[in-house]
């Protein structure tokens, strides 16, 4: 989704999440008839933390509308707003109690319509987050469902008898709590892959599917340009409830592991994705999936055998690379380049520790942030925002952290308020924000970074401008260079006569890069620098020996 933001390379960008690397030209032969979402930079917005217009400490839709100029100037083409629907907020919006309204804490439908129309004036599309696997336990469907064994909506959820006084089987919830919740009223258990307040919908019931497909039409008719589909891996479960086999080790909550083969990634999910896609196509909309795949083959499946499922399944394997490593990123890019679809690299999001913390070495953090920006862009990452992890259990808001403390501290750290200025609470709100801002907001905020041509934000802005100007960054083939170099990730993006070279030093020592571009058609190439994160002459001269400082990034046009 962001492609979070794009990367210079190949990415398409998303702000939050993911950045996408464009596929190679072999896979994308017609480079000039691209659907809008391939040339768009997507930016994730976690509405609680973006901008607070009514000073209650929590962000809202009018806050987002008030920052559209900022997003437009940054170079964003689409925003993905994480759930803003009515919700008891047990999982901060991922527990939806009404799919066709806005939670009053964020505003109302009128505010939403205004946001869409103001965004449209700035050529920004709006993508919503569709929580398809489960509802809130306060949704009217579930309230009816749990009211009696014969209620109209009983079969909209997954109810089963226990085995004596034990749950129906050994499936586990993702959040460290039991996956089956006993409901005294009817004496049965319901199934919840996440929290008990998030009962799983029964997608085998055609009425559920029809109702959920209608939800997408409701929002498309209001001008929404697509959805990020939450937790698609978990839509279906084995109807016979076979126990999952055990697997080695323990999970982050200290529970024994199981291979979740009977309750995740069942083949039926593809039928649903195809149905969602048929409707999306009628509206020229995009479907982005939260897809936790273990390998490229699984990722590939999510595009659909006939490219008729998700246009952009997120490559979350990218986000699992926790150290700067040129060989590892090279391997990841090469792998996704073979998947055949439009890649979406995810480096961070509201569930993943910020890349500033994951890759920063404490000394070159801003330099590393610019380097990673040169690989793609992300949510709030355009400022070099840091995680602000809770230090005490009593401060934790995310129930996952409350359950898992201290081994699993939850996701509060990556969800702290956007840092707009040096004003109180980083200019996010006049009231105490729902999560605390880190002290680093004094240096890392929009106002200060706009004035500093060397800031992380300035580098993002240049990269985004470049991405919109240089077709090779969107359409070009990806060719890995110097594949044995353990320190510098080097590659070429080439579209017709245009070629762009990207060099990223992922190490803490300077490195000289020698390039031989002859095999790609340049016998004595000339380089003109488009962007470098360090002092570099405007013309880098020949490609024979370029020196990159620690964590330096250089992007240059190549000509004959
Ligand atoms: C994925 C979302 O990104 C996460 O924040 C949420 O807790 C789970 N899905 C459950 O909906």
Image (cartoon, helix red, strand yellow):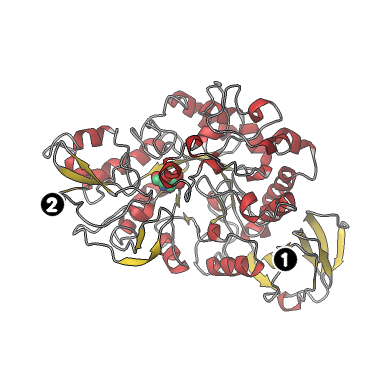
The quarter of the picture where residue 198 lies is top left
Q: Is label 1 in contact with label 2 (beta carbons under 8 Å)?
A: no
Ligand 1 neighbours mark 2 (CB distance < 8 Å): no
Q: Earlier in the sequence, mark 1 or mark 2?
A: 2
Element marked by disc 1 = loop
Is residue 40 something that shows in the picture? Answer: no
Is residue 278 something that shows in the picture? Answer: yes
| 245 sits to left or right of 164 | right
Rate crowding at label 1 as few (under 14), some (14 to 19) or many (20 or more) other CA atoms within 10 Å.
few
Residue 497's label in the rendered image is 1
| 407 sits to left or right of 214 | right
Task: Give the number of callouts.
Answer: 2
Ligand 1 neighbours mark 1 (CB distance < 8 Å): no
Q: Quadrant of the C terminus?
A: bottom right
Q: Position of residue 518 (x, y in %)?
A: 76, 78
| 261 sits to left or right of 326 | left
Q: Position of residue 478 (x, y in %)?
A: 63, 67
Q: How far apart in space, not on screen, are marks 1 and 2 (Cα)?
A: 71 Å
Q: Position of residue 9 (x, y in %)?
A: 66, 59
- Answer above or below: position of 256 versus 56: below
Q: Residue at x 80, y 74 (%)?
A: 514
Element marked by disc 2 = loop
Observer-side mark, 1 or 2, equals: 2
Residue at image mark 2? 164
- Answer above or below: position of 491 versus 532: below
Q: Residue at x 55, y 40 (%)?
A: 390
Q: Position of residue 58 (x, y in %)?
A: 52, 28
The outermost residue toward the left is 150
Rate crowding at label 2 as few (under 14), some (14 to 19) or many (20 or more) other CA atoms within 10 Å.
few
The quarter of the picture where residue 90 lies is top left
284 or 215: nearer the viewer? 215
């Amino acid at each position: 989704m962001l492609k979070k933001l794009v990367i210079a390379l190949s990415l398409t960008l998303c702000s939050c999440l993911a950045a996408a690397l464009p596929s190679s030209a072999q896979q994308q032969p017609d480079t000039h008839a691209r659907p809008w979402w391939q040339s768009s930079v997507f930016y994730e917005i976690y509405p609680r933390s973006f901008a607070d217009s009514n000073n209650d400490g929590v962000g809202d839709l009018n806050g987002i509308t008030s920052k559209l100029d900022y997003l437009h100037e940054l170079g964003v083409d689409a925003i993905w707003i994480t759930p803003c629907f009515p919700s008891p907020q047990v999982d901060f919006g991922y527990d939806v109690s009404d799919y066709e309204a806005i939670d009053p804490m964020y505003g109302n439908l009128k505010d939403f319509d205004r946001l869409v129309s103001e965004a449209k004036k700035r050529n920004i599309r709006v993508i919503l987050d569709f929580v398809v696997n489960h509802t809130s336990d306060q949704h009217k469907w579930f309230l009816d469902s749990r009211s009696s064994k014969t209620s109209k909506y009983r079969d909209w959820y997954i109810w089963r008898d226990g085995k004596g006084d034990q749950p129906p089987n050994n499936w586990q919830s993702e959040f460290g709590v039991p996956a089956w919740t006993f409901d005294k009223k009817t004496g049965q258990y319901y199934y919840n892959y996440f929290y008990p307040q998030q009962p799983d919908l029964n997608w085998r019931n055609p009425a559920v599917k029809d109702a959920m497909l209608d939800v997408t039409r409701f929002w498309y008719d209001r001008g929404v340009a697509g959805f990020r589909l939450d937790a698609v891996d978990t839509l279906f479960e084995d109807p016979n409830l076979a126990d999952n086999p055990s697997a080695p080790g323990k999970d982050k909550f200290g529970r024994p592991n199981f291979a979740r083969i009977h309750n995740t990634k069942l083949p039926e999910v593809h039928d649903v994705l195809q149905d969602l896609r048929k409707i999306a196509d009628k509206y020229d909309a995009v479907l982005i999936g939260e897809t936790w795949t273990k390998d490229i083959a699984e990722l590939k499946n999510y595009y659909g055998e006939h490219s008729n499922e998700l246009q952009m399944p997120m490559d979350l394997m990218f986000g699992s690379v926790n150290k700067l490593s040129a060989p590892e990123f090279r391997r990841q890019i090469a792998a996704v380049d073979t998947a055949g679809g439009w890649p979406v690299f995810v480096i961070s999001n509201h569930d993943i520790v910020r890349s500033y913390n994951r890759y920063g070495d404490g000394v070159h953090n801003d330099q590393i942030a610019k380097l990673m920006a040169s690989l793609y862009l992300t949510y709030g990452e355009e400022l070099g925002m840091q995680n602000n992890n809770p230090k005490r259990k009593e401060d934790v808001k995310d129930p996952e952290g409350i359950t898992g403390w201290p081994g699993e501290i939850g996701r509060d750290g990556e969800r702290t308020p956007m840092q707009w200025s040096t004003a109180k609470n980083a200019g996010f709100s006049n009231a105490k924000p729902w999560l605390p801002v880190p002290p680093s907001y004094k240096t890392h905020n929009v106002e200060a970074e706009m004035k500093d041509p060397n800031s992380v934000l300035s580098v993002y802005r240049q990269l985004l401008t470049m991405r919109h100007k240089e077709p090779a960054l969107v359409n070009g083939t990806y060719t890995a260079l110097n594949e044995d170099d353990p320190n510098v990730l080097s590659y070429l993006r080439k579209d017709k006569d245009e070629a762009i070279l990207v060099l990223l030093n992922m190490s803490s020592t300077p490195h000289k890069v020698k390039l031989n571009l002859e095999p790609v058609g340049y016998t004595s190439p000339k380089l003109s620098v488009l962007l470098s994160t360090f002092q570099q002459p405007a013309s880098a001269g020949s490609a024979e020996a370029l020196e990159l400082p620690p964590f330096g990034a250089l992007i240059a046009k190549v000509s004959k």
